Amino acid sequence: MSTTLGVPAALAEKVMEFIRAKTLPLEVVAEGSGTIQVVQSEGRQQSDPSTLQAGGWIACEDAFAAASKLAIPTQTMGKLLNTLDIRMRSCQLGCF
């Protein structure tokens, strides 16, 4: 089974450009059917390892878990979060 991101149409091109630029082994599929879902946040809602809230935030521990689910390096996960305008909170290093 391939690793997939379920992405809404409004964000699909932005996410696909990121994946192509980083040559990641990820596939973008219609929202609702991916390993991890990407949704547009209503305000700054909290993300979790299964659902990334574009425009929201995520705890560092959950970002590590999401990176593991997608089988990508944590540094790349951080860049994906930046692409989706997802802020980090509760950093394990105390940086954010």
Image (tube, helix red, strand yellow):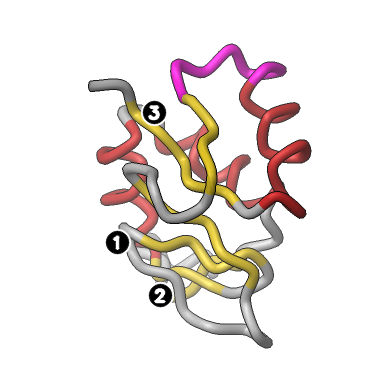
Front-most of residues 66 and 89:
66
Which residue sits at x=56%, y=64%?
39
Q: Magenta residues, as a range? A: 20-26
CA gap, disc 3 to disc 1? 15 Å
Q: Secondary structure at mark 2?
A: loop
Front-most of residues 36 and 86:
36
Vertical relation: 93 (above or below) 6: below
- Where is mark 2, residue-wise? 90
Q: Quadrant of residue 55?
A: bottom right
Q: Please tell me which of labels 2 and 3 falls first in the chain.
A: 3
Which residue sits at x=36%, y=41%?
67
Q: Give left or right: position of 87 versus 77.
A: right
Q: Give left or right: position of 44 versus 63.
A: right
- Measuring from the top left, give residue 95's x and y in whole percent: 52, 64
- Within 10 Å of disc 2 (Cα), the crowding (few <14, some 14-19, many 20+) is few
- Measuring from the top left, give residue 63's x and y in whole percent: 39, 55
The answer to whether mark 1 and mark 2 are in CB contact below 8 A is yes
Amino acid, disc 3: Ile
Q: Please tell me which of labels 3 and 1 falls first in the chain.
A: 1
Q: Quadrant of residue 56?
A: bottom right
Amino acid, disc 2: Ser
Vertical relation: 89 (above or below) 62: below
Amino acid, disc 1: Glu
Vertical relation: 82 (above or below) 24: below
CA gap, disc 1 to disc 2? 8 Å
- Measuring from the top left, give residue 76's x and y in whole percent: 52, 32
Q: Please tell me which of labels 1 and 2 falls first in the chain.
A: 1
Front-most of residues 93 and 12:
12
* Disc sitting over residue 81 in the figure: none
- Where is mark 3, residue-wise? 72
Q: Is residue 24 magenta?
A: yes
- Where is mark 1, residue-wise? 61
